[in-house]
Amino acid sequence: YGLRCHRAIITICRLIGIKDMYAKVSGSVNMLNLTRGLFLGLAHQETHQQLADKKGLHVVEFREECGPLPIVVASPQGALRKDPEPEAEVPDVKLDWEDVKAMQGMKRSVWSGLKRSHT
């Protein structure tokens, strides 16, 4: 997909041979901080084996040339977990926008008390 990130990160990735990467910069775009953050992130990446051991599940990879069959990249060293990875539970709550605005003190417009002067 290419390099989709800040120009400083693109330059560093080209120098070290990374071809596909997406990174979003939040906060300061100071070049020194970006460089430090990139190298800290690269140094603290987990390997497939570390991820499998931490989660207790097999890490698999899907490739086009293999069709729908997964390739096992890493297996956990300890016991294999039986239950799948839990998905984030999103509560099904219907929010009334008027109630939300009233709770935040935004029920009335900030311009409602403004009087227009006739010129």
Image (cartoon, rainbow, N blue to C red):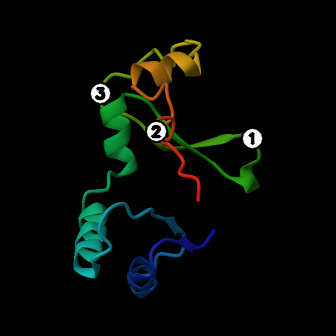
Residue 65 percent across, percent down from the top left: 75, 56
110 relative to 83, above or below: below
Query: What is the three-letter code of the residue carrying label 3?
Result: Gly
**Residue 72 in sight:** yes
Q: Which mark is residue 110?
A: 2
Mark 2 or 3, closer to the camera: 2
Which residue is located at x 56 percent, y 16 percent? 95
Residue 112 percent across, percent down from the top left: 51, 35
Please indicate whether residue 55 sits to the left or right of residue 106 in the image.
left
Q: Quadrant of residue 36?
A: bottom left
Please indicate whether residue 113 sits to the left or right of residue 95 in the image.
left
Mark 1, Cα crowd under 10 Å, few <14 / some 14-19 / many 20+, is few
Please indicate whether residue 65 sits to the left or right of residue 8 in the image.
right
Query: What is the three-letter code of the residue carrying label 2?
Result: Val
Residue 82 percent across, percent down from the top left: 45, 15
Q: Which mark is residue 78?
A: 3
Q: Which mark is residue 68?
A: 1
Mark 1 or 3, closer to the camera: 1
Kindly indicate whether the residue at mark 1 contacts the one at mark 2 (C-beta within 8 angstroms): no
Q: Quadrant of the C terminus?
A: bottom right
> 73 or 100, which lies in front?
100
